[in-house]
Image (tube, rainbow, N blue to C red):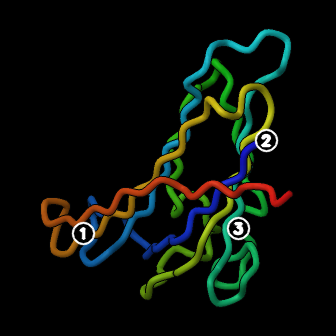
Amino acid sequence: MRTAVIPHTLEVSGRITNAQNTFDTTWFVTYAGGVASGGGEPVADLYLFDQALGRPSSQGSDACGPCKFSLASKPARKRLLRVEDLLPSSFTGVRGPVLGYGIIVVAGADPNAVNLQGFVTNARTSAFDLSVFGFEPVPLEAVP
């Protein structure tokens, strides 16, 4: 099992492709190992925490406590996770930014072969006026 912290998420309702002054936080979770033989499939559990409340929530509604994703060869060995897609419907129309962090736990077969990568993208005036920040989630190590 592997655990990593996604130290910063930033989201505003709306996509960078169709809204001004918005943020999109996206993670890529990819299983790069061989097909597991009898050990099951890798799975990822994502927990989202609202910075203000310190619990899996957004704007007072529960979100990803956890959201579970299979990384089997079928349906997909890779996942594109958008924070906005994981937040509850009450998030739609939120104007101010939602700040928080995430914890991702990778378990099952071959968790060390699962790659994690994240991006925060900011669109100012259009999808052609962007700032992008890429990051790798920070692994958490067990304390002996």
Whichever of callouts 2 and 3 sits on the residue coming sooner in the sequence is: 2
- In the figure, 93 relative to 130: above or below? below
Disc 2 marks which residue? 1
Disc 1 marks which residue? 123
- The quadrant of the rendering that contains the C terminus is bottom right
- The quadrant of the rendering that contains the N terminus is top right
Percent of width and height locating residue 19: 28, 70
Rendered image quadrant of residue 74:
top right
Percent of width and height locating residue 66: 77, 57
Residue beneath the point at 71% across and 62% down: 47
Residue beneath the point at 27% across and 78% down: 21
Residue beneath the point at 71% across and 76% down: 57
Mark 2: few, some, or many residues within 10 Å (few <14, many ≥20)? Answer: few
Q: Which residue occupies the extreme front position in the image?
A: 144
State the separation of the CA atoms marked 2 and 3.
Answer: 23 Å
Q: Which mark is residue 60?
A: none
**Residue type for callout 2:** Met
Q: Secondary structure at mark 2?
A: loop
Disc 3 marks which residue? 63
Q: Which mark is nearer the camera, 1 or 2? A: 2
Q: Are marks 3 and 1 in contact (CB under 8 Å)?
A: no
